[in-house]
Image: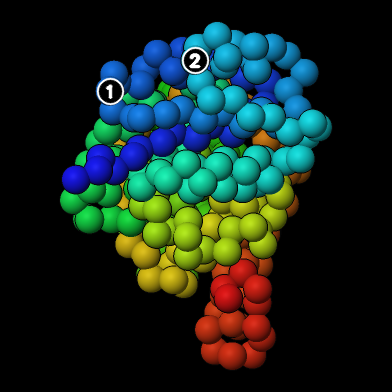
Amino acid sequence: MEKEKTVVVMPAYNAATTLEKTIKDIPPDCVDEIILVDDGSTDNTVEIAQKLGLSVYFHDHNHGYGANQKTCYTIALEKNAEYIVMVHPDYQYDSRLIPVAIDILKLKICDIVLGNRVRTRRECLRGGMPLYKYIANRALTIIDNIALGQNLGEFHSGFRAYRRSVLETIPYHRNSDDFLFDAQFLIQAVYFKFILGDIPMPVRYFEEASSINFYRSMVYGLGSLKTIIIYYLHRIGIIKSALFK
């Protein structure tokens, strides 16, 4: 039997100082290829990625975080990946857990596996997570879980592993090109009846780790709530949204 291909995708933007540490943490022989898509970085992210032997693609200018993921997933599907793991190259998420997430997918326990950094308030704050982000993360996750019938520890994680069928089903090209992409994708996953789960992961917030400011966090949060409303209106037939077709 042909071996099922596992691919890591990294949506990168100015990740030169953290990329190598992220790559070194990936356990040997657990993935077949690492794809990095650079979204118009102004540092030497591309050069470092090439030296590390990654498969490097790049946008000619900054298109946005969501647009970067769209490119990542499209390339992974074109390369016949059966399991796709998205890891930020900013060292905020622990890439040592990639084989754990893949094993859960291979056992067909879940279709999507997320990294859960939010286990205790003390751990989050000690790990450097700003208080307002902790509060917003907890509040949004509680709302998402209740509204969507889930029980995830963290709904807004940047560590995600998928079975191929998830990316083939969800119309992710219709999603936002910005950070709202993440929330839209998981709400779509619930709509299409995929099974979501999570694994514990340490909290890492530090100066080089990418982060959105308070204003963009508010825009993201409101956009997430709006998408839940659209999800319900689509389900009961009041509107027809392209996100769920």
Q: Quadrant of the C terminus?
A: bottom right
The spot of residue 108 in percent (x, y) is 22, 56
Asked if residue 179 can be seen in this view, the reply is: no
Task: Look at 27% across and 23% down and name the residue there.
Answer: 29
Residue lying at 44% horizontally and 18% vertically, measured from the top left: 23
Q: Which residue is mark 1?
A: 29
Rendering coords of residue 32 (x, y %):
36, 30
Q: Residue at x 47, y 41 (%)?
A: 79
User: Residue 200 placed where, x, y %?
Assistant: 30, 37
| Quarter of image, res 175 | bottom right
In the rendered structure, which amino acid carries the disc numbered 1?
A: Asp
The answer to whether 223 is drawn above or below residue 115 in the figure is: below
Distance in Å between CA atoms under marks 1 and 2: 14 Å
**Is 3 rendered above or below residue 236?**
above
Answer whether labels 1 and 2 touch (C-beta < 8 Å). Answer: no
Q: Position of residue 134 (x, y in %)?
A: 51, 40
Q: Earlier in the sequence, mark 1 or mark 2?
A: 1
Q: Is residue 165 above or below residue 239?
A: above
Q: Is residue 41 left or right of residue 164?
A: right
The quarter holding residue 184 reads bottom right
Q: Secondary structure at mark 2?
A: loop
Amino acid residing under circle 2: Gly
* Structural crowding at the residue carrying mark 1, measured as other residues with C-alpha within 10 Å and reported as few (<14), some (14–19) or many (≥20): few
Task: Specify the label residue 53 is tagged with.
Answer: 2
Q: Quadrant of residue 36?
A: top right
Q: Nearer the viewer, residue 135 or 168?
A: 168
Residue 107 shown left or right of residue 196 in the figure: left
